[in-house]
Image (cartoon, rainbow, N blue to C red):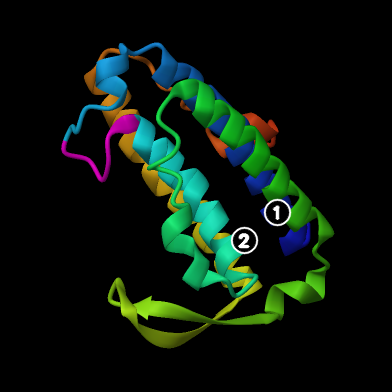
């Protein structure tokens, strides 16, 4: 299987599980969804942060519009599960459209963009990233934050929808006994 097809499957897998995570978050009392539990953000904000990472890379970085980003942060606007669900549907479609349009040779294409230096929006540095590196980073970002969400959901007595990629694809490799 070619790398681009593998990437597309990973993005579909993440999107399918992402919807299940929002269902799990919704089972929590409203106060626990927004409670700062010592993670990177409160639980619902972690979910929205993942969505915002897709926006950052596929819209602001890819389109070289990083300077427009600060006034468009999602965590400040998406404050409920209902709003997160609407935003998730929209961003998932955007992600699927983006990866669906790519050709294999696009993975090596370099994106040049200017980013704030050390989170200082008054100083800028030149950055370069391949589309390949950007896409694999987005997968890694979501998986890392999914682990945080798992821990927080377990802490509050809600079973997270832990489904491995191999289970989702039903491609578990069976090794014959010798």
In the rendered structure, the answer to whether residue 86 lies left or right of residue 170 reads left
Marked residue nearer the N-terminal end (1 or 2): 1
Question: In this picture, which residue range is highlighted in magenta?
Answer: 38-43
Camera-side residue of 121 and 10: 121
Label 1 with label 2: CB-CB less than 8 Å: no
- Residue 36 visible in the snapshot: yes
* Position in image of residue 173 (x %, y %): 65, 39
- Would you place residue 28 above or below residue 42 in this image? above
Name which quarter of the figure residue 124 lies in: bottom left
In the rendered structure, the answer to whether residue 137 lies left or right of residue 11 reads left
User: In terms of secondary structure, what is the magenta stretch mainly?
Assistant: loop
Which residue is identified by label 1? 6
Q: Farthest residue in the front direction? A: 71
Is residue 88 shown in magenta? no
Tell me the number on the disc at residue 146.
Answer: none
Camera-side residue of 143 and 73: 73
- Would you place residue 49 above or below residue 122 in this image? above
Q: Residues within 10 Å of mark 2 (few under 14, many from 20)?
A: many
**Which quadrant: the C terminus?**
top right
- Residue 163 visible in the snapshot: no
Tell me the number on the disc at residue 58.
Answer: 2
Q: Farthest residue in the left direction? A: 38
Camera-side residue of 166 and 178: 166
């Amino acid at each position: 299987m070619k790398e681009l097809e593998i990437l597309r499957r990973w993005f579909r897998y993440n999107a399918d599980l992402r919807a299940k995570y929002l269902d799990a978050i919704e089972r929590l009392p409203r106060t626990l969804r927004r409670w700062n539990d010592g993670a990177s953000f409160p639980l619902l904000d972690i979910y929205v942060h993942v969505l915002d990472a897709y926006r950052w890379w596929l819209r602001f970085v890819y389109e070289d519009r990083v300077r427009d980003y600060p006034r468009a942060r999602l965590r400040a606007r998406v404050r409920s599960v209902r709003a997160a669900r609407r935003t998730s549907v929209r961003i998932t479609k955007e992600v699927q459209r983006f990866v669906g349009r790519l050709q294999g040779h696009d993975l090596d294409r370099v994106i040049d963009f200017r980013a704030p230096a050390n989170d200082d929006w008054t100083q800028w540095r030149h950055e370069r990233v391949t589309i390949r590196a950007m896409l694999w980073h987005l997968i890694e970002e979501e998986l890392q934050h999914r682990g945080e969400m798992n821990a927080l959901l377990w802490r509050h007595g809600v079973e997270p929808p832990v489904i491995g990629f191999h289970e989702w694809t039903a491609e578990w490799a069976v090794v014959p006994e010798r």
